[in-house]
Image: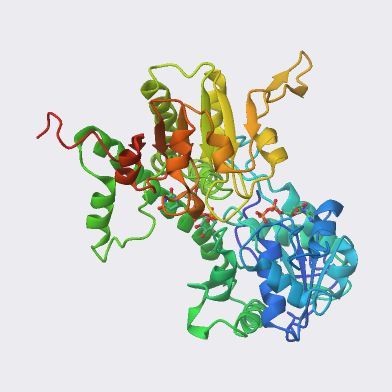
Amino acid sequence: MATAASPLSTTTLGAANGTSLASPGIHPPVRSICCIGAGYVGGPTCSIIAARCPHIDVTIVDINPARIAAWNSDPDPLTGDLTGLPVFEPGLSDIVKECRGRNLFFSTDVDEAIRKADLVFVSVNTPTKKSGVGAGYAADLHYVESSTRRIAQVATSSKIIVEKSTVPCRTASSMRVILESNSRPGIHFDILSNPEFLAEGTAMRDLQAPDRVLIGSLDTESGQCAADRLSEVYENWVPAERIYMTGLWSSELSKLAANALLAQRISSINSLAAICESTGASIHEVAHACGLDRRIGPQFLQASVGFGGSCFQKDILNLVYLSESLGLTPVANYWKQVIEMNEWSKNRFAHKVVQTLFNTITGKKVAVLGFSFKDNTGDTRESPAITVCRFFRRELARVSIYDPKVPEAQIHADLVDREHDATGVVAPQGTNNVTVCSSALEACKDAEAVVVLSPWREFRCENLDWGHIYENMSKPAFVFDGRAMLDAEKLKKIGFKVHAVGTGPEKTDAWL
Ligand code: UDX
Ligand code: ADP
């Protein structure tokens, strides 16, 4: 990634080749928005903008026609819900139904939407690089680059360009160079950073009442004007005091920093959970005791099998790469440890299952409840369930999985064995010891153990008939609670042998 020594906040067509230098643009109020990328971030974010700003036309575009077709899919004839949307978020269907065709449009015509827009959100994927320089750590920016090139090539008027995707610090400077070098004479761009802090499952709530909206710009007249224009869009529903204007690079880094700090809390509590399991302390009590200190606070101290999701691991790896690139190896090592602790937590939990089931699960039926990386989402990216289920498969268990939202094909795709042939081609080898079930009761029937991996409410003791599950399992019947969310005492009364993350051994052991 380029790191310009003296980056400009604005680019004016012709500035790069010296033909013309138009005065910095004073942007008109935003009336038309294009969002490039109809994914988990772009879709919900721009749907809320459309709902709260009926005077603004919002067009969400994507190069993937299947994804756009899903966003445009018809309501379920019985319920009226838009069940075919490519992203499941509580509340999203209602918002899309309200706005679609009014001032919210989904299209594959990327060029036309860019041309019409006063402001373009770049909301494309930025996965971790799989090969080349920085493989395994750095963000793959080729989707950002190709959409930036597209903007430069097709824009016929000046625009505000907004980085929405999580990007490495100083990506705006690379975008500036691309825009400068490829756009038509007389056209002026300002680049802003406006990272998304929404969490899946609560995205609509997070978007409607955000803790803060961060807008990063450079300190030039047109950069400030662009930031003000974007702020005006949010001020249609966000109180002005929650909109925090920063420098461009601070805004880019803040997104990585916020995710790194959140993930660090989870790795910290999971490291303490391991101590609890060996001492008889309870992680619930320890977390509560620590969280009562206002400087620490109670959020994000829920011990678990490990964190997942598309952001935490990717963003920390990005931070590690940035630190290494800057020669800050101790900083890189510090953040790397958060990921290593997470990997260790997932493996520790999987080993505990095998160890408890008399050191073998070969041929045994293991029921897995929950496959998504958290509740209220069908997203499986970096889900701890993938690591744990792959471990069970390697141990030759028969794995039966139930998740309320993850489609069967996705579970198979995540667990499929792959074999590299001599040419390096990857061939799927199937998932024949994995069964995807349509209910928790079905998944648990005749199982030797139930392993809870995502914290869906429907798995709680008050919502699921655990007595019925017990009656239909092999004995002894084990429950492994990877989310420390079940009422262990109640389960023990039914007859289960229970292991929950962060609890045990029994309080009557040798420590007392
Ligand atoms: C995260 C950030 O919260 C959000 O601000 C950012 O924009 C994107 O990344 P998300 O990945 O959707 O959001 O989910 P989050 O609620 O943060 O949970 C991430 C993972 O940590 C999940 O697997 C969750 O189950 C786990 N988790 C969370 C814990 O194990 N314990 C906790 O206390 C909190
Ligand atoms: P996120 O979680 O960041 O929203 P997703 O993978 O869910 O990431 O969505 C990103 C979307 O961006 C994908 O649907 C992908 O097809 C789309 N996309 C990537 N590059 C481009 C591009 N150049 N033009 C339009 N859409 C793009």
Q: Tell me the quarter of the picture where residue 338 sits.
A: top left
User: Does residue 119 appear in this view?
Assistant: no
Q: Is residue 194 above or below residue 393?
A: below
Question: Ligand 2 is in which quadrant of the figure?
Answer: bottom right
Q: Tell me the quarter of the picture where residue 336 sits.
A: top left
Please give the name of the residue rendered at 86% of the width and 75% of the height, measured from the top-left corner.
Answer: 116
Residue 8 image position (x, y, % from top left): 66, 67
Image quarter (top left, top right, bottom left or bottom right) of the C terminus? top left
Please give the name of the residue rendered at 54% of the width and 49% of the height, measured from the top-left corner.
Answer: 315
Scheme of image coloration:
rainbow
Question: In front here: 128 or 306?
Answer: 306
Question: In front here: 398 or 188?
Answer: 398
Please give the name of the residue rendered at 83% of the width and 61% of the height, measured from the top-left corner.
Answer: 73
| Residue placed furthest toward the top | 422
Please give the name of the residue rendered at 57% of the width and 46% of the height, measured from the top-left corner.
Answer: 372
Q: Is residue 89 left or right of residue 35?
A: left
Question: In front here: 30 or 276?
Answer: 276
Q: Is residue 168 left or right of residue 296?
A: right
Q: Tell me the quarter of the picture where residue 350 sits.
A: top left
Q: Is residue 50 above or below residue 502?
A: below
Residue 357 image position (x, y, % from top left): 40, 22
Question: In front here: 58 or 277?
Answer: 277
Residue 424 image position (x, y, % from top left): 75, 19
Labels in figure, total = 0
Q: Is residue 488 left or right of residue 403?
A: left
Residue 389 image position (x, y, % from top left): 55, 30
User: Does residue 52 appear in this view?
Assistant: yes
Q: Is residue 501 above or below residue 215?
A: above
